[in-house]
């Protein structure tokens, strides 16, 4: 089950911390009121974590170990391969 983040509709709350998280099934209806203070609330978008323990999911070594190829912009229309074994070493879009 995902964890959903909620915030007061007014943007602030003097009775509780304001933003809170709730573990809900994907099919559950969004909450309409804060369970702590009763103020109207809404589900908000929260940031996604791309970290993986001590490493980072988008590090070239991790991508390569999972079979992906990664390119980095090296100039105007030029992209250099930074991870992977498939594909050309340089891509030129001209």
Image (tube, rainbow, N blue to C red):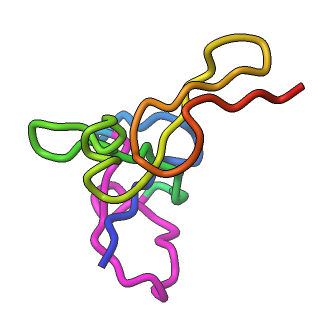
Compared with 20, 18 (above or below) is: above
Q: Quadrant of residue 13?
A: top left
Question: Of residues 45 and 82, which is closer to you in this image?
Answer: 82
Secondary structure predominantly adopted by residues drawn in magenta = loop
Query: Does 7 sit left or right of 10 as displayed?
Result: left
Location of residue 71 by image quarter = top right
Residue at position x 49%, y 51% in the image? 86
- The reply to whether the magenta stretch includes residue 85 is no
- 78 vs 32, left or right, is right
Q: Which residue is pictured at 51% across the width and 32% down the height?
A: 81
Q: Quadrant of the C terminus?
A: top right
Name which residue lies at 36% across and 40% down. Answer: 58
Residue at far left of view? 54
Whole-percent x, y for residue 34 in the image: 39, 60
Q: Quadrant of the N terminus?
A: bottom left
- Residue placed furthest toward the top: 75
Q: Between 7 and 84, which is closer to the camera in this rendering?
A: 84
Point out residue 41 in the picture as x, y percentages from the top left corner: 51, 56
- Percent x, y of residue 46: 45, 47
- Segment tinted magenta in the rendering: 18-38
Report the number of discs: 0
Relative vertical location of residue 48 with respect to residue 34 in this rendering, above or below: above
Residue 29 falls within the magenta-colored stretch: yes
Q: Is residue 2 above or below residue 4?
A: below
Q: Nearer the viewer, residue 9 or 85?
A: 85
Compared across the picture, whether 90 is left or right of 40 comes to right
The image shows residue 73 at horizontal and vertical percentages of: 62, 21
Q: Residue at x 62, y 14 (%)?
A: 74
């Amino acid at each position: 089950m995902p964890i959903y983040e909620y915030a007061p509709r007014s943007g602030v709350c003097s009775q509780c911390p304001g933003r809170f998280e709730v573990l809900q099934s994907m099919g559950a209806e969004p909450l309409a009121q804060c369970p702590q203070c009763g103020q109207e609330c809404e589900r908000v978008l929260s940031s996604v974590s791309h970290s993986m323990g001590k490493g980072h999911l988008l590090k070239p070594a991790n991508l390569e170990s999972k079979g992906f190829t990664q390119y980095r912009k090296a100039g105007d229309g030029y992209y250099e391969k930074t991870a992977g074994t498939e594909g050309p070493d340089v891509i030129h879009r001209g």
